[in-house]
């Protein structure tokens, strides 16, 4: 299956494109860029991501550091990239905060159990059908029923695992990884600081948009 062979390359491309756009955004309003400029950015990002400058490309270097970036990591940066490009964000700050909090909570629970700080190590349960598959299915159904935008991420966890799109055979590796934990912690810190500034007397709380 061709998609399985190249699926891992999607994250490095999305990640590097996002970083490149963040650098550009210091001098340019990305949302006001013309379509062909945005297309040029995507093409240039593809070049610097996959061209083997020193025998290995940036994508190769990233995947050598972490060969199994989770669906959670990919989803987070797709959301950030979309929010960067669009005048109307794909996901509000509130939902982005909820997703980051989910990532941190689940990751810490998983890693603490793996390191022995919790009585039972749940990581091996990700290799075979267990109660955790039912828990994730239940959460996914609830999110779909509520029309929550993050329901698509939970559907992606399950679909990607069923298709075995990542090298790992463990379901939990599709949900999170160490990189996602660090980025989500940073995201929570950033959103918290941003929220406090908007609600400070000098920050114009009344002008804060309702998310």
Image (tube, rainbow, N blue to C red):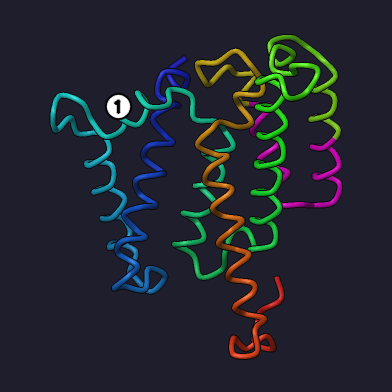
**Residue at position x 42%, y 34% from top?**
10
**What are the residue bounds of the magenta stretch?**
139-159
Outermost top residue: 128
In which quarter of the view is residue 52 placed? top left
Residue 32 image-quadrant placement: bottom left
Please name the residue shown 52% across and 46% down the image. 183
Residue 45, above or below 23: above
Who's the residue at 81% across and 14% down the image? Answer: 130
- Residue 8 image offset from top left, x and y in percent: 43, 26
Tell me if residue 169 is in the magenta stretch: no
User: In the visual, does 32 lie left or right of 186?
Assistant: left
Position of residue 39 relative to residue 27, above or below, is above
Residue that carries the numbered disc 1 in the rendered image: 60
Question: Where 130 sits versus 40, above or below?
Answer: above
Which residue is found at the position 67% from the left and 81% from the top?
199
Q: Position of residue 154 (x, y in %)?
A: 70, 37
């Amino acid at each position: 299956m061709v998609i399985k062979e190249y699926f891992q390359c999607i994250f490095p491309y999305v990640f590097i494109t996002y970083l490149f756009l963040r650098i550009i955004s210091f001098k340019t309003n990305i949302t006001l860029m013309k379509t062909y400029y945005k297309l040029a950015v995507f093409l240039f990002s593809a070049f610097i991501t996959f061209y083997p400058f020193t025998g290995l490309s940036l994508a190769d270097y990233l995947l050598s550091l972490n060969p199994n970036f989770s669906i959670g990591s990919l989803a987070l940066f797709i959301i950030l990239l979309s929010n960067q490009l669009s005048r109307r964000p794909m996901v509000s700050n509130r939902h982005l905060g909820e997703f980051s909090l989910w990532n941190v909570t689940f990751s810490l629970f998983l890693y603490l159990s793996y390191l022995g700080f919790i009585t039972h190590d749940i990581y091996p349960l990700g290799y075979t059908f267990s109660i955790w598959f039912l828990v994730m299915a239940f959460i996914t159904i609830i999110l779909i029923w509520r029309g929550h935008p993050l329901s698509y991420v939970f559907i992606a966890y399950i679909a990607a695992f069923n298709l075995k799109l990542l090298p790992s055979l463990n379901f939990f590796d599709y949900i999170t990884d160490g990189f996602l934990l660090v980025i989500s912690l940073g995201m929570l810190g950033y959103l918290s600081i941003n929220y406090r500034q908007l609600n400070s007397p000098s920050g114009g709380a009344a002008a804060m948009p309702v998310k």
